[in-house]
Amino acid sequence: MRQNQAFVPTLRDVPSDAEAASHRLLLRAGFIRQNAAGIYSFLPLGKRVLDKVQQIVREEMDRAGAQELLMPAIQPAELWHETGRWELYGPELMRLRDRHEREFALGATGEELITSLAREVNSYKRLPMTLYQIQTKYRDEKRPRFGLLRGREFLMKDAYSFNTSIESLDESYQQMYEAYEKVFTRCGLRFRAVLADSGEMGGKDTQEFMALAEIGEDTIAYSDASSYASNVEMAEVIDFYEKSDEPERERGKIDRTTFENAPASKRLQSRLYAVDDRYVLVVLRGDHSLNEVKFRNALSARKIELVDDKTVEALFNCDTDALGPFHIPDDVKVTADYAVRHLVNGFSGAGETDTYYENVNPERDFSVEAFYDLREIQEGDPSPDGKGTIRFARGIEVGQIFKLGTFYSETMNAHYLDENGKACPMIMGCYGIGVSRTVAAIVEQHHDEDGMIWPLAVAPYQLHLIAVNMKNDAQAETAERLYETLNKSYEVLFDDRKERAGVKFADADLIGLPVRITVGKKAAEGIVELKVRATGEVREVRADEIETVLPELLKSLAGE
Ligand code: ATP
Ligand code: MG
């Protein structure tokens, strides 16, 4: 492609709200443009990257035996009514009506649609089956931000497996796991597969693929000595606490200041939650924080909500600040984190306004109905697999694999006949990759202060051919000749613009193609310069030897 004609509108300045490096650089280099909050156009260079990522995803899905189809982005509401998700999904689901007042959703995900198709399969002989599509998805995100990382319209690969047994589901899941590892490796990402919360009661297997990056919205807890990695949302804290052998002292009243000055690890914090239709007081150590996902899962609850001061006052006749596991009304249950069980001579609110206790000891002074692992894991905690210590890293969720079970097949009547002619619900898995988010994640990991540094496999072009001065005949001729020959075997962006050299080099760094070929003053002697964007490595090569040098160089860049 000749850059003189190319639609690559580079920018000097970007909007100040573009916080993420990928957002800034993709805008500046003319890869994307925003059309509305969280809604983007992919300009020609951006489209080429998106296509390459898509192609990698497609190849690995096909290799794993999945079949590609394409479902509409507009989905009839009736299907969402079948599963009840029309009501459950909330404002993220974009809804619309046609001229006949029929309701539709813009697909936020595709379980309903795919199940409506797959239920045509009625024999065990056709299963297992994995279907996938690469299709635009819509979510009216509360906070679209960071450019392609959290959009309201984005490209997703969504795959669904239909199985006849748990073992078969495990196999499909494992195949997808391996395909995801290949996809993200080929995209040049550093990533970890982490355990995640299924958001469902009981918890089904699910893992998220996290591209490691500071801008990531998720925190990953990983072991420094094993392969353990989990989303902090649900990272388990084992009951590793040891009770001190300090003798239990007599409990006594203290004032608020004394309570507040006690060491956090000896102070109890108590909070009242509405858990579905009952009240639960949850007690934690002062230096720990409640993990609401674990709390909800521990109580097998659908909904939990911290209650307001008024409700506390009405139930306990006490200020929220002085809440504690004392003076508990009959209909309130007390739960606590494991760490509380090991506390000796602690401090706590007394369940009476402005009253606090010292030398509080569990069992002796108050009772707890059940102890659970309820707190957020912290750096320095032991890894739950018993190996090593927990460290934190930030990650961008680029994909997720999920064992769904039979929720969709049961609500939507997707049954098959087994060997004995008995109708059974299909067992399902679903597997998503954020294709457009992956493009941004790649930039987050591969850039420097001058611009992007595309890994070869996803670069919009492999080579950036630059004629330093198009007005110089020797340079223009050499560059034109090279362009013609290289274009036959490589993807070449040819900067044939009549711009200053400085502008061209700056743009080349910004766009970040893997190899730059500069035709400059030495063109008269038949010599050009090769530069590797990632390392800055430069060497001079005879123009007529380029074709012998390039294959080796590109191979090494591809990591082969
Ligand atoms: P998140 O927690 O980031 O909101 P999610 O868990 O709701 O994502 P999934 O339903 O698992 O998303 O969708 C599959 C994949 O689609 C995600 O792993 C992510 O890569 C991508 N994705 C989800 N929401 C967005 C979005 N708003 N913009 C871009 N990509 C997204
Ligand atoms: Mg997810």
Image (spheres, helix red, strand yellow):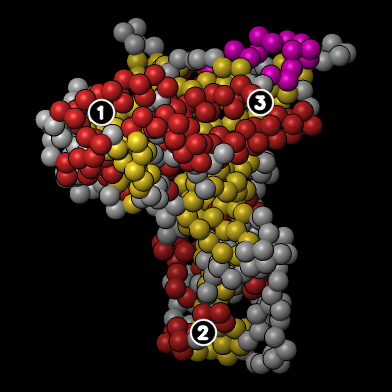
Indicate the quadrant containing the C terminus: top left, top right, bottom left or bottom right: top right
Secondary structure of the residue carrying tag 1 is helix
Say whether residue 430 is left or right of residue 70.
right
Residue 153 quadrant: top left
Residue 64 shows which numbered tag? 3
State yes or no: residue 236 in magenta. no
**Residue on which the image places disc 2:** 263
- Tell me which numbered mark, 3 or 2, is placed earlier along the sequence: 3
On the question of residue 439 being in view, the answer is: yes
Distance Cα–Cα, label 3 vs label 2: 55 Å
Distance CA(mark 3)–CA(mark 1): 43 Å
**Depth order, front residue of 155/444:** 444
Of 47 and 16, which appears nearest the observer?
47
Residue at 70% across, 86% down: 244
Residue at which label 1 appears: 479
* Inter-mark Cα distance, 2 to 1: 72 Å
Task: Look at the picture and state if 297 lies above or below 254.
Answer: above
The reply, left or right, for residue 351 in relation to residue 237 is: left
Q: Amino acid at mark 2?
A: Pro
Q: Give SS at disc 3.
A: loop
Question: CB of mark 3 within 8 Å of CB of mark 1?
Answer: no
Name the residue located 82 percent from the left edge and 15 percent from the top edge: 418
Q: Amino acid at mark 1?
A: Ala
Amino acid type at circle 3 is Ala
User: Residue 298's spot in the image, x, y percent?
Assistant: 65, 54
Near mark 1 (Cα within 10 A), the count class, few <14, some 14-19 or many ≥20, is many
Which residues are the magenta region?
112-129
Q: Is residue 457 above or below residue 259?
A: above
Say which residue appears at 27% left-offset and 49% top-offset: 450
